[in-house]
Image (spheres, rainbow, N blue to C red):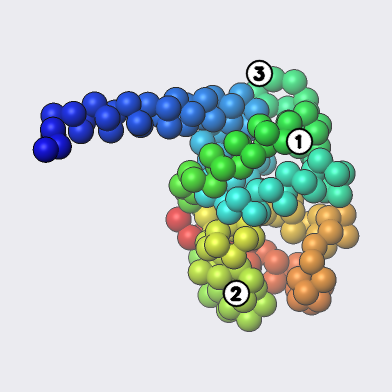
Amino acid sequence: MFNKKLLLPLIISAALPLASAFADDAALVKDKCGTCHGADGNSEDAKVPSIAGFSAATLEDIMEQYKSGDRKGDKYTPEGGEETDMGAIAKDISKEDGSKIIAFLAEQKFKAIKQDFDETLIKSGKKLHKKKCEKCHSENGANAEDDAAIMAGQWRDYLQKEFDKIAAKERDIPKKMKKKFKKLSEDDRKALIEFYISQQ
């Protein structure tokens, strides 16, 4: 007959390696990403995106873009730190560590950022999103399962910077996105951004 008193020690002993691995991965993310993106991927700096809760596929794609140089990293100096950029950081991360970082961040919860927004633009921004963006960025840009970056509740400054790069053709995007994005006016882009950041 099975001894129930043995069950709890067995569960605990089985869980200990998992807990240890999680702690190690959390420490790795904090070391490699925490200074800029926050210890759990939720950034506290408006210039740096929150990446917690992004799908593993999205995070892997972003990492590879920076590693290969297809996507240029912005120069950034964290408080109390030295100037760096995502290109340099990505190239310094091994494949094994990269896999651990991606898996850890994908399991974290994205925390929508509380920030002021222009209420007069929300309606037009929502309409534009539904017409131009919802097919690939569903749930108003909040669904990580689309394997696309989460825009709902993201920092305004970061979104503005990336939209400006795309408009200036300084950042490459998929062809199907290019066709729609090029038709957006500056006012359209502003309305979209205000709609995204209003989702708090």
Q: Earlier in the sequence, mark 2 or mark 3?
A: 3
Q: Is 107 left, or right, of 2 in this rendering? A: right
Callout 3 secondary element: loop
Quadrant for residue 11, please give it. top left
* Residue 67: assigned label: none
Please name the amino acid that badge 2 sits on: Glu
Q: Residue at x 58, y 54 (%)?
A: 55
Q: Residue at x 54, y 39 (%)?
A: 104
For the residues carrying marks 1 and 3, which lies nearer the camera in this image? 1
- Look at label 1 and name its amino acid: Ala
Image coordinates of residue 175 in percent, x first then y, are 82, 71
**Left or right of residue 67: residue 96:** left
Q: Nearer the viewer, residue 190 or 16?
A: 16
Mark 1 / mark 2, whichever is N-terminal: 1
* Residue closest to the eye, 36 or 185: 36
Which residue in the rendered view is the most extreme toward the top?
A: 80
Could you say where residue 191 lies in the image, as x and y percent from the top left? 63, 68
Secondary structure beneath disc 1? helix
**Furthest residue toward front:** 1
Horizontal relation, residue 10 to residue 199: left or right = left
Nearer-the-camera pick, 78 or 37: 37
Which residue is at 20% across, 33% downward?
7
> For the residue carrying disc 1, how many other residues have a C-alpha within 10 Å: few (<14), some (14-19), or many (20+)?
many
Residue occupied by mark 3? 80
Q: Which residue is mark 2?
A: 134
Location of mark 1 (residue)? 90
| Three-letter residue code for mark 3 | Gly
The image position of residue 48, as x and y in percent, is 65, 41
- Closer to us: mark 1 or mark 2? 1
Mark sitting earlier along the chain (1/3) = 3
**Rendered residue at 24%/26% (across/down):** 9
Q: Is residue 198 above or below residue 90?
A: below
